[in-house]
Amino acid sequence: LVHRLDRETSGILLIAKRRMALKLLQEQFRERETDKVYLALVSGNWPTNQRVIDKALHKYLLPGGERRVKIVPNDHPDGMRSVTLVKVKAAIPASAQALATAFSLLEVTIKTGRTHQIRVHLAGEGHPIAGDDKYGDFDWNRQLQKPGANPGLKRMFLHSSSTKIRHPLMQDKLVLEAPLPPELSKFIQKLETSAPSRHTTIYLRCTADDLRGA
């Protein structure tokens, strides 16, 4: 494995067939010469002016031994600087069919590859990822997972959609892309179908004389 994805995350995963390729590709990741872009669906309306999250992260263990990550002050002795870039790809207004919750589909680029970085950063801004069972809104997730929920979501909506690298030998620039899997694509379609129209109808009161003058 050149890098890792969380178990619940779909999309692009790089695997090297030879040790030399592994070494060269991992060096690109360490030197931040790659671009990894994810699609994440979060609750609420993400502010369009919030484009950079630069907050340190710290790994710790729960009493049972499960690994978790939290945001800490940037000068924390055990904190690791973590930078996430966020761009709003689509804003989906609230509707009765979608638990009266607005959604934001985000295009997220990570400049550092920390454990659970995207999940913790987005949740820390008050916009957890739909279906995230570690850092998300658990009541909201249960509503999305209920039998017969329309739309329903059975997994976390986080997808590695594109990765830019240099070929380890030829040095050509490569852009790898993976479309949304069917279950996430269908979920988005249902949300957009159930969302109220963004068009506004304006009614003008006119007299007969007004119409003749026009």
Image: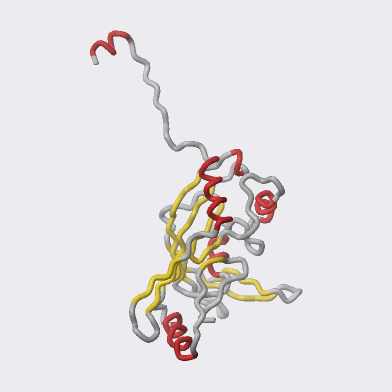
Find the residue positioned furthest to the right. 64
Q: Against 140, is 173 above or below?
A: below
Which of the two residues, 196 or 62, is positioned nearer the viewer here? 196
Q: Residue 151: x percent and y percent? A: 61, 46
Q: Against 19, is 90 above or below?
A: above
Which of the two residues, 214 or 85, is positioned nearer the viewer here? 214
Say how the picture is coloured: secondary structure
| In the displayed structure image, the side of residue 148 where residue 120 appears, left or right | left
Q: Against 183, is 113 above or below?
A: below
Q: Residue 129: x percent and y percent? A: 57, 58
User: What residue appears at the point 65 percent right and 50 percent down from the top-left corner?
Assistant: 144
User: What residue appears at the point 53 percent right and 59 percent down from the top-left corner?
Assistant: 125
Which of the two residues, 184 or 182, is positioned nearer the viewer here? 182
| In the displayed structure image, the side of residue 165 where residue 184 appears, left or right | right
Total count of labels? 0
The N terminus lies in which quarter of the figure? bottom right
Q: Residue 115: x percent and y percent? A: 57, 74
User: What residue appears at the point 71 percent right and 48 percent down from the top-left corner?
Assistant: 147
Find the residue positioned furthest to the bottom. 20
Q: Residue 46: x percent and y percent? A: 48, 52
Find the residue positioned furthest to the top. 208
The C terminus lies in which quarter of the figure? top left
| In the displayed structure image, the side of residue 196 where residue 139 appears, left or right | right
User: What residue appears at the point 49 percent right and 72 percent down from the top-left corner?
Assistant: 82
